[in-house]
Image: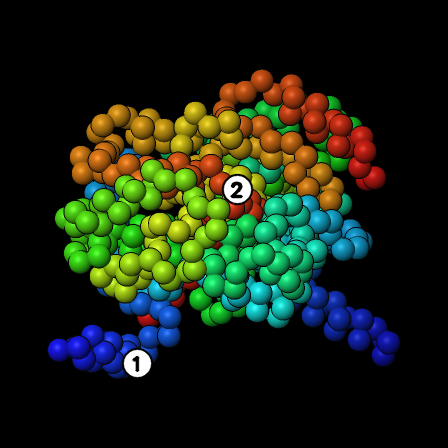
Amino acid sequence: MRRLPVIAASLAALCALAHGVEPGMAPVPGGGYRPLFRGEKDAKEIAVAPFLLDERPVTNGEFLTFVRANPKWRRSQVKRLFADERYLAHWGGDLDLGKADAAQPVTHVSWFAAKSFAAWRGKRLPTTAEWEFAAGSGFTNADGAQDAEFQKAIARWYATPSPDVLPAAGSGRANVFGIRDLHGLVWEWTSDFNSAIVTGDARGDTGLERSLFCGAGSLGAKDTANFPAFMRFGMRSSLKASYSVQNLGFRCAKDP
Amino acid sequence: MKFLLPILALHIATVLADDVPATKKDADLPPCCRTALAAGKPTDRSLYQLESTWTSDVGRKVKLSVLRGRPQILAMFFSNCEYACPILVNEMKKLEAALPKDVLAKVDFLLVSFDTRRDTPEALAAYRRKEHLATERWTLLRGENDDVRELAALLGINYAADSRGQFAHSNLITVLNAEGEIAFQQAGLQQDPAPLIAAIGKITNSAQH
C-alpha cells in the first residue's frame, strides 16, 4: 500500500515524458476563464488553450544563474528604464545572494527582468487569463470554488501579512495539476499585467469605462465572492513594468 | 561612367532595402523614415533602448531609436476605435495647431497602434489620409503583440481587447524628449492643454535641433 504514491509519481513522470513536458512544468488543460471585469456584451468566459506552467515560482538560485549568464541584468548594470532602484535589493550584490536563500522565490524583479528570464529559458510569462485559470483550481477539485479546503487556505493567506522570511518555492500544497504556490507565497507577474482597466486612477480614465464599470451588470455573479481575485486585479493594476518590489515574483509558462 | 556604376548600384541597393521610392526625399517622408540623426548610446531612461521593430504606414521597418534627436508627442491608438481615439487624435491635432511655429518646427507626432491585426501599414496610410496627418510631422507605426505590450508597459498605458475587436485603453499623451525619455504625460481626455504646451515648449528650448 505504501508503494502506491511512488507508483503514481512514476506514472506521472512517464506521462510527462510521453507528452514532451519539460521537467518542473505541469500541463494545464484548456478551459474557460471568467474575467473579473468585462464589457456587457463580452463573453462570460475567455477560452484558455492548453499550456505548460512552472510547478513553482522561479527561485533566487535560478535567477542568479540567469544574471551570471546575462550581465546586463545584474543589479549594478541594469538600465533604470527596465528596473527601478529596488531591483534585487534583497541580494548581497551582483552575484551574491547575501541573506536571500537560493530556494526562496526570487522577488524584487521587474516585469522586464521576468520576461527576459523566461525568454532565456525558452519560455514566456503566463497571460493573466492563464495564470488565473491555473490558480482557480483547487487541491482536489479542478474547480477551486467547489473545494472548501482550498477556499479556506486561500482566505487565510490573503488575510495574513507576509512572513519576514519567505518559505522555499515549492513548499506549498500542490493543486490538481501539480502546481504549487500560486497562492500563499508571493504575487506573480503576468505577461499582460497591464491589461487591467481601471478608472479613478491618476494615470487616466479608460476608453470603455462605461461598459466596463456599469455596475453589477458587468460582473459575473460568481465573481463577486472571489475577494482574492479582486485583490490580485487591484495589485496588477497598480503595477508599473519597472517596479521591483518585495513579495512580487514570477513563474514561466510555455506552449505545449 | 565606370566609376558611376558602383555608386548607382549602391543607391539602388539602399532603395530596395528601404522599400521607398527613390524619388522621395527626406522631407517627403514621415519623421520615422528620414536619415537618422547621429547619436551615441541611448541613456538609461531612454525608450530608444528598445530593440523591437515597427512598421510605418509607408511600409518601412524601423526601430524606435530612429526618432532620436527630436522630441516626440506620442499616443497609442487604433484606427477602428469607436469611442476615445478620435478624441485623443483630435486633441493631438489641436495641439499641433496651437503650438507656436518655432516650437512646431522642432517636434514630431507619433501614433502607435494597439491593433496588431487590423492596423496594417495600408490601414494606417488610409488613416493618415482620412485624418490629414501631415507627412513631415506625423509617424504612424504598427508592431507585433509583445512589442506593443512592452511599449505600453513602458508608457504606463493599460489596454485590453474586448470581444468586438475594440480596445479599452488608457488615454495618455506622452512627450518624449530628444533622447527618448518620458518628459511629460497628460492623462485623460479633454484636459486643459496649457501644461502640455508648456512642457513641449520647455524641452524644445533645451533641445539642440
Q: Position of residue A99 (x, y in %)?
A: 58, 56
Which SS class for mark 2?
loop
Relative to the observer, which residue lies in front, B190 or A131? A131
Q: Which residue is mark 1?
A: A17
Q: Residues within 10 Å of mark 2 (few under 14, many from 20)?
A: many
Can residue B32 be seen in the rendering of this structure?
no
Q: Which residue is mark 2?
A: A240
Query: Is B108 left or right of A20, judged from the image as shown?
Result: right
Q: Position of residue B154 (x, y in %)?
A: 57, 45
Which quadrant of the view contains residue B200?
Answer: top right
Relative to the observer, which residue lies in front, B150 or B26? B150
Quadrant where the N terminus of chain A is found in the figure: bottom left
What is the three-letter code of the residue carrying label 1?
A: Leu
Relative to the observer, which residue lies in front, B128 or A248? A248
Gap between marks 1 and 2 measured at Cα:
38 Å
What is the three-letter code of the residue carrying label 2?
A: Lys
Q: Chain of mark 1?
A: A
